Amino acid sequence: MKPLSLTEIVESKKFLFFGGKGGVGKTTMASATASWLADQGYKTLIVATDPTVSLSAIYEQPIGETEITIIDKQENLCGLNINPKKAMGVFQSRMNNMMEGFSTLFGSELLSTPCTEEIAAFDQFVSHMADTEHDKVVFDTAPTGHTLRELSMPFDWSGYITNQIESRKELSELMGFVYDENMINDLKAERSRYDAAVRALSDETISAFNLVLLPEKLPVDETERAVEDLGTFGIKVPALIINEVIPREVLQGNWFLERRRATQDKYLAIIGEKFQDKVLREVPLFETDIYGVESLRKVGKILYG
């Protein structure tokens, strides 16, 4: 069976994820993809889960951190820039309501673990995996290692919460707290919700997790590890976008640029050898910064035609 092209991948899936090492341009590629899809008539939402990213800068307008914002200069496009600290407040409030009186007794400990902020951000992410209002949801994910932690921690954390509550059942009753099995069931439902999101991530009929990299040693090595690590969650990577490739037409005898391009050629060959089963798409190094809808459209045209 002939593999899908990059254009076919993004048009045939609802959930599109862009990941990679920090600084390789995944936000640009995610945003360019969202803009391109919106131009094709798809009602599109772009969600940034990277705490270091600002969609506001790339779209040149304020983008909500808790509420979805309409992109002014482009039809069919909305954005959300998840703020982990604000997400944590929303998450803690919801969990406190879920655990009612028990959270008053033990909530400060249970909801203040070192990883709570990351889990809260993932909780926001999960809510958009159940989206029914948009044709496409594009996720600009956190750098690879951070994303992998977010994929694994919710199950450990929800299991920890359940074990803590069950182990303290006797103590809570002694303190006059009415132990409610419904509370445990609610927490188990949360765990099932996370499970469903990861299953959706690995469902190739609705999701695609594409990686962005530069033709350099460290990004290539990290991409290889990311493909393997995502595979442990059952998530396949159909495509790689190789960013900032120096155009040959600008070399013109420039010694520095020729040496840099020769180095890139070496790693482009390595990428082609290591990832023969992936769709590979090169994006050139631009002479200016990429921000604003029109610049994103230029990148989208290179990616998808």
Image (cartoon, grey):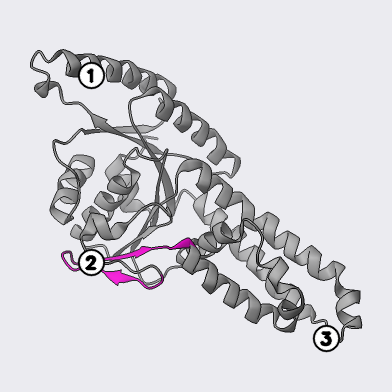
Among the two numbered marks 3 and 1 on one chain, the one whose residue lies closer to the N terminus = 3
Residue where numbered disc 3 is placed: 178
- The answer to whether residue 24 is left or right of residue 87 is left
Is 53 situated above or below 211? below
Residue where numbered disc 2 is placed: 71
Q: Position of residue 178 (x, y in %)?
A: 83, 86
State which region is magenta. 66-84
Residue where numbered disc 1 is placed: 261
Cβ atoms at labels 1 and 2 below 8 Å apart = no
Q: Residues within 10 Å of mark 1 (few under 14, many from 20)?
A: some
Going by the numbered disc 3, the residue's amino acid type is Val
**Is residue 276 within the magenta segment?**
no
Going by the numbered disc 1, the residue's amino acid type is Arg
**Residue 194, quarter of picture:** bottom right
Q: Which mark is residue 43?
A: none
Q: Position of residue 227 (x, y in %)?
A: 50, 35
Among the two numbered marks 2 and 3 on one chain, the one whose residue lies closer to the N terminus = 2
Is 203 situated above or below 271? below
Going by the numbered disc 2, the residue's amino acid type is Ile
**Residue 305, quarter of picture:** top left
Callout 3 secondary element: loop
Callout 2 secondary element: loop
Among the two numbered marks 1 and 2 on one chain, the one whose residue lies closer to the N terminus = 2
**Residue 61, quarter of picture:** bottom left
Callout 1 secondary element: helix
Is 207 situated above or below 261? below
Task: Report the residue at 54% width, 41% height from top.
Answer: 230
- In space, the residues marked 2 and 3 are separated at their CA atoms by 48 Å
Q: Residues within 10 Å of mark 3 (few under 14, many from 20)?
A: few
